[in-house]
Each structure stands twice: as C-alpha cells, then as structure tokens.
Amino acid sequence: MIEGGKDIRVREAREEDVGHIRDLFHIVYGPDYPHRKFLDETWLKRSIFNDDILLLVAEDIESGELLGSASVLFDTGTHSDLVGEFGRLVVHPDARHLNVGKALMAKRVEFIQNRLHVGIVENRTVHPFSQRISLSHKFAAVGFLPLKNKFHERESMALFSRHFGQALSLRRNNPRIIPEAHGLAHFALKNCSLPNDAIIDDDSPAYPQSHDYSLEELTDTSLPPLIRIERGRVRRREIFGPVGLQYGFFQLRVRRANYLLARERGVEGAAGPIAGAIGYILDPEDKNLRVFELIAQTDEVIGFLFKSLLDRCRKKWDIEYLEVDTSAYSPRMQRTLLELGFLPAAYIPAMVFHEVERLDVIRMIHLRVPFELGQIHLTPPAQIIADQVIRTFTCHKILPQVAQAMARLSLFQGLTEEQEARLAGICCVQRFESGETLFHQGTPADRMLIVLEGSVRVHLSEASEPVGTIQAGESVGELSFLTGEHHSATARTDGPVLAAVFLDDDLAALIRQRPDIGMILFRNLGVGLGRKLQRMDRDKVS
C-alpha cells in the first residue's frame, strides 16, 4: 500500500504491457518526445527480451492499470564498464503524488545493484520531482547538461550518479584536470563522499592540429587496418562511450555509430595508411552528437579529427549539442577540447573501467545554440553543480569581449596571452544601471571590478560629493582586496556601466595556483592605485 490508498506492484514488463507503456509516454510527453523509441511498440517489445535493458512497470493491483514505467539501459558504457543509465521514468498524471516514481526507482536499484558499478540518471530541470527521487535513493549530483534534449524547446538536464559494489575501491586516485574543471570536480567529488584529490594541471598543452591528412568515412574494408591501432582503444584511452570499434561493422550500424578516418597523404595523391579515426553517434532529430572513441597513431592527428568533425556538425548536419566523455587523467585532451569550444559540464567519478582501475570522467559539452536556459528548477545539490557549469559557459561567452578590452586595461599589463585567458576565465561580466551603488562605505569587500564601459564615481560618504571618477580600463574595489579591510568609500555608477567582476575568493584561489599571475596583478594594482590617488589629490586641489 502506498500513499493515496492504492496497492502498487512494481514488476518487470511483459509483452502485453507494450501498448500501455507507449500510451504512458504519449500522454505525459506527447508525440514530440525526443526519445522516440519509447513511442515505438516494436522497440519496446524487443526491450522486454533484451538483456541490455531492464524495463519495469508499476501497476494498480486491484484494477491492473499501469501507473508508471521506468528502465535501466545497460549499454550506456561498453560492457566491461558496468555502467547503466537509469532512464525514462514516466508516471501517469493521475497517479502523481502516489510515490509511484519512488517505488520504480527503489525496484530498479534492487534489480541492478549486483550487476552495475555505476548508475547514472539524467533528470529534467523543468521541475525538481525526478531530481528529488534520485537524491532520496543516494544518487549524487555530478553535472548539469545545458540545453541537451530537444522537447518543444531545448531543455537542460541535471546529472546524478551512484556507485555500487567495488566501484570506488577500484578508482584511480589523483586525476589531473585543467583549472576550468576544478570547481566542478570539487563539488562532484564532495557529493560522492570522496576527497578532492584532483591535481590541477595548468601546463599541459593541447594536441597539435595538422592538416596533412585526407578524410573519409568508415567502411567494412577500412575496419581491419583501423582496429590494429591500439592507442585510444586498448592503450591510452582518453575518450569513452557506449560502443567501440571492436563491436564490428554491423553492430556499429545498428547503433547508428560511425567513424571519420584520417589517412596520411600518399605519393602523387595515392591513399596513404590510416592515421586515426573518431567515432560518433549522430541523432539528427534531436540535433545531438556524441563522440565515443578516438583512435590515433600520433598526437598530430587528434586535433585534425576533432576539427573535421566540428566542421561537419556545422556545415553538413546542423548539430546543436555535442558531448564527449574524456579521461580526467588526460589534461592534454581536456585542453584540446577546451580550445575547440568544449566546456566541462559534469564530473563522474570512477565511471569507466580501463586496464585494472576505474577512471573518473569529465563530460565536456560544445553548444551551437545561444546559451539561453530559460526557467529551470533544481534541488540544492544540483543547483551548486549547475552554478559552476553556468558560470563556465557564461564566462566563455563573454571572454571575447573581455579579451578585446584587455589591451586597454592597465591591470593586465605585462600578462602573456595565456595568463590573460586564465584571469579572464574567472570573471563574469555584469551590467549596472545609472546611479546604481556597486558597494557602500564600511561594507565587507568581496569583489573587485574592472570598468569596461562607462564610469564610476567614488564618494567618501553616502551623501558627499564625489572625490574621483573611475574610467573605462580602471579597477574599483582593489584597495580593499589588497588590504582585506572594509570598503573605505562608496562607489556609484555615473551612467550605464559594463564591468568585469572578480570575486575575491576566486581571485585568491587563482593566485595561489598561479603566483606568476598574482605577482603581475599586485604590481599593476599598486601602480594603478598610486595613479588614482594622485588624480584624486589633484581633483581636491582644483
């Protein structure tokens, strides 16, 4: 008996349930549901007898009516990864608030906990109900996938994971990650009750991009020579996914998987040997693409393959969302993806099995649509993760604008291009209305601002006349940052202002990681402060 007075039984689906399951998805999601296989009776029927899928239903014992359905897909990773996706939970609208969803989740966990090492679930963000169900069953928030699925409009997903059996005892320690993924990794590891043992790698360069290759698609004749390349398949795996080249040509086609191959250029235009390949799954209806494997003879072919795939996504397929799971122990691959426009969106500890250990994975996303999330509803753990991801995407969006202003910002004088990019990456750009107070005299200092457009007037007291003006290209709030004291003045905009905002905690963390940047910043702040004081003294005299 569950709340609401109904006796509910959760069981494995039978063939006679197929039509009812399809109707459930149609009633709840309508005909435009992006995961169309759940509206396909043939696929549902096959799923019931498929060992790679667990399909459950919840029924009213008295009436026999189906109130909900849920599944676990065991082919989310390759078979040796022991990863399953807890997906596609649906509850009839009339049965909501009867804990049907919780009953289905509990039965799924019961069925699979001896079969999987890692369970993941993507929950919609238009409402928090499914997120709460995941949290109540010990799933931890580890990611936020912006605009991943296309319903009537593109929707974002909150990503949760749970570990079973020996998963965490087999985890490799001390992943090496780029700084852009560190905040996300910190909170994901914490949510999974793991220590933050990630090592920030700010030195590893991206893989080079060579253009001296020809490009073709995989055929049955090109598969044997490609499968002989070990790097990326059985050695030095850096990209992970649900299939691999060893599945064979037929199974790859069944799963809508394909490869782009790079060949060395032979003599007088002849086809040379295969240098590498990139595997991908394309969903033309959802306009999504997932990279699942990268095979490479040398470093030089890696950048070429990714760049070629991105070109096809733009020119041929009109892809809006790209996703790739990369090793948290391969900072060069992470840096390569970052420079190609992929950004960290999830950090999943111990997700894949490689050789003798389970490896953490960073899910990186490339968006080709405007970063306009709309209204989202998140539980507190998911919100903390989402804040990290949203900030990364927002900062990336405004980086060109900040970079354009770098040349005229005295704060950045003497920084290299790489140092400028690292510093700009921790800021956010904010617009302020005319007459808006940035901070009050005597209040704690928690941020420093760089005026990009407009000007700011400084007042020694709330009602006093301004004693100075901060122009575009100058900083405000830096004295309190240097001293750790409360603001000694009030700053108020003189007309509309666009400013780059640096939070003190983030700036301090960056300086701890990169003392070379800190040394230049403090020198420039000191010089700028001296000039500002001199100008204020002249203003007083005049």
Image (cartoon, rainbow, N blue to C red):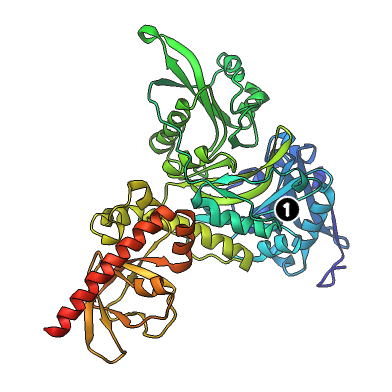
Residue at 22% x, 83% y is: 467
User: 164 above or below 294?
Assistant: below
**Residue type at the position of mark 1:** Arg
What residue is pinned by disc 1? Answer: 162
Q: Residues within 10 Å of mark 1 (few under 14, many from 20)?
A: many
| Residue 455 can be seen, yes or no | no
Residue at 64% x, 55% y is: 196
User: On the image, which quarter does residue 534 sit in?
Assistant: bottom left
Tell how many labels: 1
Give residue 390's position: percent from left, percent from top.
Answer: 49, 59
Give residue 385's position: percent from left, percent from top.
Answer: 58, 60
User: 171 above or below 265?
Assistant: below
Foreground: 484 or 8? 484
Foreground: 310 or 471? 471
SS of the residue under disc 1: strand
| Residue 110 can be seen, yes or no | yes
The quarter of the rendered structure image containing the C terminus is bottom left
Give residue 246's position: percent from left, percent from top.
Answer: 66, 24
The quarter of the rendered structure image containing the N terminus is bottom right
User: On the image, which quarter does residue 458 sit in?
Assistant: bottom left
Foreground: 490 or 247? 490
Give residue 122's position: percent from left, percent from top.
Answer: 64, 53
Foreground: 80 or 479? 479
* Furthest residue toward left: 542
Residue at 45% x, 38% y is: 205
Residue at 75% x, 43% y is: 170
User: 314 above or below 8?
Assistant: above
Position of residue 216 in the picture relative to residue 228 (left or right) = left
Position of residue 236 in the picture relative to residue 54 (left or right) = left
* Furthest residue toward bottom: 463
Position of residue 210 in the picture relative to residue 250 (left or right) = left
